[in-house]
Image: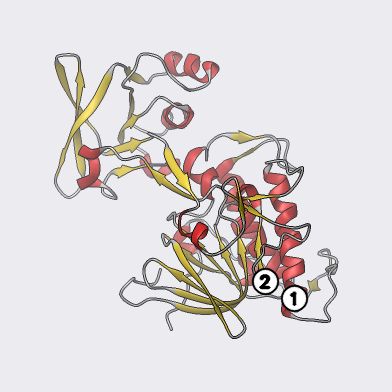
Amino acid sequence: MTSPTNPAEVTVDLAIVGAGPAGLYAAYYAGFRGLSTAVVDALDEPGGQVSAMYPEKLLYDVAGHPGIKGRDLVDNLVQQAAPFDTAYLLGRTAVGLTPRDKGWALAADDGSRVDAGAVVIAAGLGRFVPRKLPCSLPYEGRGVAYHVPRLEAHAGRDVVIVGGGDSAVDWALALVPIARSVTLVHRRAAFRAHEYSVRQLHAAPVRVISDAQVVACHGGDRLEQVDVRCGDEVLTLSAQALIAALGFTSGLGPVAEWGIDLEQRRIRVDQSMRTNLPQVYAVGDGCTYPGRVPLITVGFGEAGTAVNHGAVALRPGERLAPEHSSDASYGRATVPAAPLVRSVSDLPAAAAA
């Protein structure tokens, strides 16, 4: 990715705020319509809430998939958009939207800027900020994380997970066959996770320490040990990884200050997914209109609707209805074979000006 000291200045047809499922599908559809695209997201990984909260959970309500893991859905969406060279500005929060002669200037918190003819806001319920474990802060990025984008990264490690919700329990169960050991620390005796998952947890080779808290972290360049207080006793555990699954806070953040009409903290749109701002659209769970149902599949349809209307707005005279995607080439783009995208390092970053 481009260094914050050398901020990117990217010019594209369409800027997308949010790299969740709806945003990623909008990136594909924009390429399908021959539009250049940049995606900005506050998280370091694409996938939004799916990657942050339930990458290992099976999703059963995505059209065409009897069941698909969250991370596999995200991988597929990134792969789908890959032929169109979407620029990804990850780990950056969109903080400002300013009109320019033709379109908008989208500013990020690190000084990056995307100049675009149109904007699609696919930020869901807003920026997700993990709840922090104070004693673990010195080891953020050095053994301490707040979600698990790739289970295999923890192969052979002693993993300590803190939390009692679905994410904590799901990750504990998923890491059992991969990690050297898995310990789950929860400050209460009762868990918030689904009852069936909790039964699986207690039947699995996971060390569960309840009514306890992680009170200290130790190590050199990386995390090596954690101290767990359980009553009057302090246990020191080997830990090369600490997953603080304490939940996330969310909010529209700076988006709410962009002059967009809101209704109960969601962006009001019309049947074309337009907001009150010219050539600014909103899709996914962060938008609202009469009768909307909050489903991933609905977000995909909204993304297609927004991009098709955006394409016509940017190129007057073009058809609203797209060509058939079954053609060997379509729109203004000839589609090459999709490059294999295995990780964030394989994603095309935004080029520096």
Figure quadrant of the N terminus: bottom left
**348 or 273: which is nearer to us?**
273
Mark 2, secondary structure of its residue: loop
Residue 134 visible in the picture: yes
Figure quadrant of the C terminus: bottom left
Labelled pair 2, 1 in contact (Cβ < 8 Å): yes
Residue 313 disc label:
1
Name the spot of residue 300 as percent of width and height, x first: 71, 52
Q: In the image, 293: left or right of 69?
A: right
Name the spot of residue 307 as percent of width and height, x first: 72, 66
Mark 2, residues whose alpha carbon is within 10 Å: few (<14), some, or many (≥20)?
many
- Is 239 placed above or below 275 here? above
Name the spot of residue 95 as percent of width and height, x first: 44, 64
Mark 1: amino acid = Ala
- Is 197 placed above or below 352 here? above
Q: Which residue is mark 2?
A: 279
Give me the residue at 40% from left, 24% from top. 164
Name the spot of residue 348 as percent of width and height, x first: 51, 69
Q: Quadrant of residue 24?
A: bottom right
